[in-house]
């Protein structure tokens, strides 16, 4: 039996995928797996029982990835599962930034008791006039799951699209419309584009990548969209630029005291992935990843351990070892098993940065004594017998 705990509201459509081998617990220390959306886990202590954390979403900046790896806790995310939800929010953002629909709606609300509202509207509407996105230049920084959907949709809406992503994956490149202009120097996005949208992960290297210098390069009256993370942008510099008119509007999905309430900063309360479809997709994917890891030891879509998938165990038992990516680990594991007269029927070993993972299918049941010997190999972080 396995236990899981939810750190945020996770879609029931996903939770229902757990079989009767799983029960939900509110006691985090009892959980084999945690399911999380945006809850901040950096200050949380993790019990030795915890084997997996699944982020039902894309961004993992709320999870201490290295500390987890060091404790042998595999962290998963659900790449692409909420990308369409975010894309649609970004397209709405493009339109809301271009047409003064939000102020227009607020005006109607404020005048709702006015009997002359219809006549007044015709007089006042000039205050809410806007511009069209067709024919305008859109620069996209980050062409992953969300960036490519935004890029392709914007082409269909008649925009001239420029894309910048020095680390673009082969899959993303295949899925990108041929209409998109490939940019190799991000400054060309800043200099050329009427609209700029950012879709990169929040990492040390991307923190405040949109800063005062970047803004200075941008066209006067540019519209900046940020549905990725607030810390990617120096928002104090953005607010100054909005107030001076350099930036016409700043669209953000991350309310904070810097941007909330500032005229021409249109901020939504982190709604990008808040659609029933995205929530269901993320939860289903997260639950499947967790079950495959807990039951079979397979790792798919982890952000702190390598992909390693041997399907279902074909031997008598499977040994799953989370360990450091250092030399002679496989040699030492094989020696321990060989000395105990245990045949390895099948095996896999993969590494990612400082961490590695090994799976061994054995023809015989492993004993506690052999498990103890494997645990004592320097660099082993966790062993599970499945
Ligand atoms: N507002 C919301 O509710 C949501 C926000 N997000 C945010 O959006 C981000 C992107 O999500 P996905 O597209 O699903 O992730 P992804 O991992 O598919 O794509 C990220 C892309 O950014 C690129 N990249 C990394 N560093 C870069 C740099 N310095 N310059 C240019 N490109 C760079 C990568 O090569 C990759 O192609 C997430 O990390 C998350 O922070 C994601 C989902 C929902
Ligand atoms: O769970 C959510 O609503 C947040 C989605 C998000 O920001 C992400 O997937 O990175």
Image: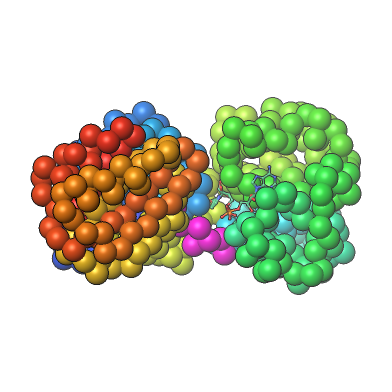
Q: Is residue 285 left or right of residue 154?
A: left
- 122 versus 329 height, above or below: below
Total numbered labels: 0
Residue 55 or 373: which is nearer the viewer?
Answer: 373
Residue 6 or 363: which is nearer the viewer?
Answer: 363
Residue 212 or 162: which is nearer the viewer?
Answer: 162
Q: Quarter-wise, where is residue 372 in the image? A: top left
Residue 225 or 5: which is nearer the viewer?
Answer: 5
Give the image location of residue 101, x and y in percent. Answer: 70, 56
Give the image location of residue 322, x and y in percent. Answer: 33, 44
Q: Is residue 383 left or right of residue 8?
A: left
Magenta range is: 77-84
**Rendered residue at 57%/64% (across/down):** 84
Give the image location of residue 355, x and y in percent. Answer: 42, 41
**Magenta span contains residue 80:** yes
Report the quarter where the N terminus lies.
Answer: bottom left
Q: Is residue 294 visible?
A: no
**Rendered residue at 28%/68% (across/down):** 312
**Rendered residue at 81%/57% (across/down):** 182
Q: Is residue 151 visible?
A: yes
């Amino acid at each position: 039996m396995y236990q899981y705990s939810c750190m945020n509201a996770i879609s029931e459509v996903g939770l229902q995928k757990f079989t009767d081998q799983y029960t939900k617990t509110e006691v985090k220390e009892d959980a084999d797996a945690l399911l999380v959306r945006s809850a901040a886990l950096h200050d949380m202590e993790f019990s030795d029982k915890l084997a997996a954390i699944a982020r039902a979403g894309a961004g993992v900046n709320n999870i201490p990835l290295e500390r987890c790896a060091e404790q042998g806790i595999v962290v998963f995310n659900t790449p692409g599962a909420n990308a369409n939800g975010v894309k649609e929010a970004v397209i709405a953002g493009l339109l809301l930034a271009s047409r003064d629909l939000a102020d227009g709606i607020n005006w109607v609300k404020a005048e709702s008791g006015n009997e002359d509202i219809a006549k007044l509207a015709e007089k006042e509407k000039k205050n809410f006039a806007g511009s069209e996105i067709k024919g305008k230049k859109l620069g996209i920084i980050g062409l992953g799951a969300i960036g490519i959907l935004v890029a392709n949709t914007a082409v269909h809406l008649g925009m001239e699209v420029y894309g910048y992503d020095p680390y673009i994956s082969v899959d993303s490149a295949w899925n990108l419309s041929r209409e998109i202009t490939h940019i190799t120097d991000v400054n060309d996005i800043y200099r050329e584009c009427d609209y700029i949208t950012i879709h990169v992960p929040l990492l040390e290297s991307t923190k405040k990548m949109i800063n005062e210098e970047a803004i200075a390069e941008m066209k006067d009256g540019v519209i900046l969209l940020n549905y990725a993370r607030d810390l990617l942008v120096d928002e104090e510099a953005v607010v100054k630029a909005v107030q001076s008119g350099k930036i016409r509007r700043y669209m953000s999905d991350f309310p904070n005291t810097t941007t909330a309430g500032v005229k021409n900063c249109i901020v939504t309360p982190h709604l990008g992935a808040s659609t029933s479809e995205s929530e269901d997709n993320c939860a289903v994917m997260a639950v499947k990843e967790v079950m495959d890891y807990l039951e079979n030891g397979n790792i798919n879509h982890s952000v702190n351990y390598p992909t390693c998938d041997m399907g279902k165990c074909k031997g008598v038992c499977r040994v799953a070892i989370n360990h450091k990516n250092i030399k002679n680990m496989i040699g030492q594991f094989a020696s321990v098993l060989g000395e105990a007269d245990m045949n390895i029927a099948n095996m896999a070993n993969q590494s990612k940065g400082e961490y590695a993972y090994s799976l061994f299918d054995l023809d015989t049941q492993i004993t506690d004594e052999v498990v103890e010997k494997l645990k004592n190999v320097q660099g082993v972080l966790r062993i599970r017998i499945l």
